[in-house]
Amino acid sequence: MVIEQQSNRPLKMGLIGGGGNGFIGKVHTTAATLDREAVLTAGALSSDPKRSRESALAMGIAPDRAYGSFRELISAEKSRSADDRIDFISIATPNHTHREIACAALEAGFHVVCDKPMTITTTDADAMVSAVRDSECVFALTHNYSGYPLVRQARELIANGELGDLIAIRANYVQGWMHGMNPDEIPARGAWKSDPNKNGRAGSLGDVGTHAFHLLQFITGMTPSKVLSHMRSYSSHHELDDYGHAMLQFAEGTTGMVTWSQVSHGRLNDLSIEVDGTKASLAWRQEEPNQLLLRSLGQPTKIYERNPNADYTLPSAVAACRLPGGHPEAFFEAFANVYRDAFSDMRRIIRGEKLGSEPVLYPSVNDGADGVRFMQRCLASVDADAAWQAW
C-alpha cells in the first residue's frame, strides 16, 4: 500500500539549465507539470552560481533547493531522504554538457529527461547508452514532435500496413529566423549555438535536422543503411551549417530525404513529413498538427482529424489526446506526452517493477544515439565531398 501511494504521488523534478532568457527550460517545466504528475522542486539553472540561484528563485523554487551548480544539486538531493529527494532531472543545457550531467545524474540514481541532440560525439553517446544500461533508470530525450496524436496515428497506420511497402520518405524542418540577425549581434538566448566547441559542428543540422530525422524514424520504424549529405552556411553570424540535405538509403529499398534550414524567408517552424507507400501516402505538418492526410490514387484525399472519440482514431493517438475533437492541441501537449510516457516507466520502477526490453513511445537513449550518429554521418559525408557514408 505504501509503495502504491509513493508511485501515485507527484514526481519531484530537478531542472538543470534553462534559466534567464532561456526558452527551453520553461517549456520543460510547463510540459512536465501540465498533467500535475510532477512538480518543479529543485534547480541549477545557470553555469554562473549567482544567476543559477536567482533564476531558480524566480521560477518559484524554494531557497534551500536553488543550487549554484548541477553537481551541488545532485549531491544535495541525493543526501535527502528517499521520500524527499527529487525523482528525475531535466537537462536544458548546451549540447556539450549533456553527457557529463546525464551520467552524473544516472550514477546518483536519478531518472533523466534530456534535451536534444543528446550530445555531440558518438563517444559521448556510447557513454550515455552504457550509463543508462548500468543505472536501470529511465532516460527520455525530448524529440517532442513524436508526442503529437496524429504523428502517433501515422506511426500506427504504417505499422498496420495501410500504406503497403514504403517507397520514399521526405522529412523537412524549415525556419527563417537567421535572416534577422546581424553579424556582430549576440542573441538574447542560445548564443552558444554558434560555438562549435559547445554546440558541436552540426549547426542547424543539430538544432532542427535531428528533429526531422527522428520524426522519420519514429513514424516509419526504419534505420538507414547509408547517408549522403550536402550542407552550406549562408548566414553571416556564424560558420556552422544553416541549410542542408541528407539522402538516405534503407536496406528495404526505401529512399529518404531530410532537409533542414534556418535561412528560408518567412518560414517559422515548418516541420513536415511525407511517406509514400505502394498502397497509399500520408502527409503531416507541425504547423497544422491536428490533421493528417492520407492519399491513394483515384480516391479522394482522406483527412484524419485529431478526435479521440472518432472510430478511426487508433489507440496510441487516443492515449495522446487531452481534449475533445475540435479543441486544438499542439506544442506543449506533445512535449508533455513525452514526459507522461516517461513518467509511466518511472512509476513502474518506484513500484519495484523491472522494465523489460519492449519498445517505448518516448524517445530513448538509443534514439538519441541514432541522432548523434546521423549528425556525424552527415558531417563525414560533407568532409568527404558528398560521399556516401555507411550507417
Image: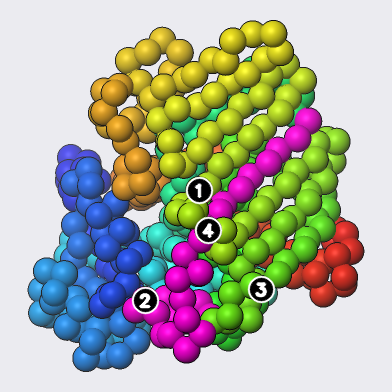
Asked if the residue at tag 4 contacts the one at tag 2, i.e. Cβ–Cβ closer than 8 Å, the answer is no
Give the residue at mark 3. Answer: 233
Separation of marks 1 and 4 at Cα, in angstroms: 12 Å
Q: In the image, which residues are magenta?
A: 167-194
Which residue position is annotated with label 2? 189
Residue 119 in percent (x, y) is at 56, 70
Answer whether residue 65 is visible to the viewer in this image. no
Eye-nearest disc, 1 or 4 = 4
CA distance for labels 2 and 4: 21 Å
Q: Quadrant of residue 208?
A: bottom right
Location of the N terminus by quadrant is top left
Q: Earlier in the sequence, mark 2 or mark 3?
A: 2
Q: Residue at x 41, y 22 (%)?
A: 305
Q: Split into 4 quadrants, where in the image is the C terminus?
A: bottom right
Question: Do callouts 2 and 3 mark residues in contact (Cβ within 8 Å)?
Answer: no
**Badge 3 amino acid:** Ser
Can you tell which mark lies on residue 265? 4
Q: Secondary structure at mark 1?
A: strand
Foreground of the two, 10 or 340 = 340
Q: Is residue 357 above or below residue 276?
A: below
Where residue 325 sits, quadrant-wise, is: top left
Q: CA distance from mark 2 to mark 3?
A: 20 Å
**What is the total number of numbered labels drawn onto the structure image?**
4
Whichever of callouts 3 and 4 sits on the residue coming sooner in the sequence is: 3
Rendered view: 10 above or below 291: below
Mark 3, secondary structure of its residue: loop
Tell me, yes or no, whether the highlighted magenta stretch contains residue 187: yes
**In terms of depth relative to the viewer, which is nearer, 349 or 383?**
383
Q: Residues within 10 Å of mark 2 (few under 14, many from 20)?
A: few
